[in-house]
Image (cartoon, grey):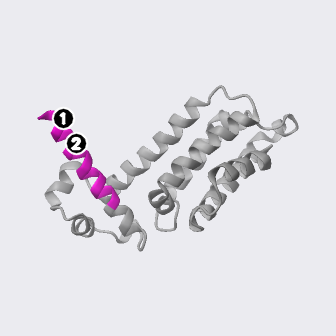
C-alpha cells in the first residue's frame, strides 16, 4: 500500500509541476494563481496544499530538482581531464536539457524566476570543475573568463531551446568545448 501511495504522490506532484510549467509559457509566475494551476491539473486546492505551500514553493521544487540533476552530472565528471571528457559532460548536461526542454526553456525564460538563472550562473561560477579546464594563459583572469563563458553558455542554451534544439547535442557540446578552450 505504501508503494502505491508514493507512486500516486509522485504522479500528483508531476501533474502539478507540468501544469505550472504550461502556465508559465504564457505568463509570469507573479500572474499565476493556485486556482489556475489546480484548474489546469484538474485537482482540488486541498490536493495542491497537501504538497506545496504556494505556487512559488512549487516552482522552487522544480528548480531544486533541476539544479540537483546538474550537480549530479558535474559530480560524475569531477575527475575529467581532457577535452573528450569535458565534451561528454557537456553532452550529458545538454541531453538532460533537451529531454526536459519544455520545463528548462520556461525556467530560463522571461516568465521564469530570474533568481533561478542567477542560481545556475552562480553554481557554475562557484564550481571549480568549470574553471579547471581553462587554458593556462587565462588562469590569471579566471573569474572574469568564467563569468564570460558561463553567461555565454547559458545564453547559447536559451537560444538553442528557442530554436527547438535545432542542432544536435553532440555538435553543440563540441562547439562549447572549442569556444572555451
Instruction: Give the quarter of the image for residue 27.
Output: bottom left
Q: Real-space Cα distance between discs 1 and 2?
A: 6 Å
Q: What secondary structure is found at the residue carrying circle 2?
A: helix
Residue range corresponding to the magenta coloring: 1-18
**Numbered badge on residue 7:** 2
Where residue 88 appears, as percent x and y from the top left, is 65, 38
Q: 170 left or right of 48?
A: right
Taking depth in this image into account, of 91 and 23 the one nearest to the observer is 91
Q: Say which residue label 1 marks.
A: 3
Q: Does the magenta stretch include residue 22?
A: no
Taking depth in this image into account, of 165 and 119 the one nearest to the observer is 165
Which residue extends farthest left? Answer: 1
Where residue 103 appears, as percent x and y from the top left, is 44, 58
Instruction: Give the quarter of the image for residue 2.
Output: top left
Instruction: Give the quarter of the image for residue 164.
Output: bottom right
Q: Is residue 14 magenta?
A: yes
The residue shown at (16%, 39%) is 4
- C-beta proximity under 8 Å, tags 1 and 2: yes
Amino acid at each position: 500500500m505504501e508503494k502505491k501511495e508514493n507512486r500516486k504522490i509522485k504522479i500528483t506532484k508531476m501533474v502539478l509541476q507540468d501544469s505550472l510549467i504550461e502556465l508559465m509559457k504564457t505568463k509570469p509566475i507573479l500572474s499565476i494563481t493556485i486556482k489556475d494551476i489546480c484548474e489546469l491539473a484538474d485537482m482540488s486546492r486541498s490536493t495542491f496544499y497537501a504538497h506545496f505551500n504556494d505556487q512559488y514553493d512549487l516552482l522552487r521544487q522544480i528548480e531544486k530538482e533541476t539544479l540537483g540533476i546538474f550537480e549530479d552530472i558535474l559530480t560524475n565528471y569531477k575527475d575529467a581531464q581532457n577535452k573528450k571528457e569535458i565534451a561528454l559532460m557537456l553532452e550529458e548536461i545538454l541531453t538532460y536539457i533537451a529531454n526536459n526542454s519544455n520545463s528548462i526553456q520556461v525556467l530560463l525564460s522571461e516568465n521564469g524566476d530570474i533568481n533561478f538563472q542567477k542560481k545556475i550562473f552562480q553554481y557554475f561560477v562557484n564550481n571549480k570543475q568549470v574553471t579547471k579546464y581553462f587554458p593556462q594563459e587565462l588562469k590569471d583572469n579566471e573569474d572574469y573568463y568564467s563569468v564570460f563563458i558561463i553567461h555565454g553558455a547559458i545564453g547559447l542554451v536559451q537560444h538553442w531551446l528557442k530554436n527547438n534544439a535545432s542542432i544536435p547535442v553532440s555538435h553543440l557540446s563540441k562547439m562549447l568545448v572549442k569556444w572555451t578552450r
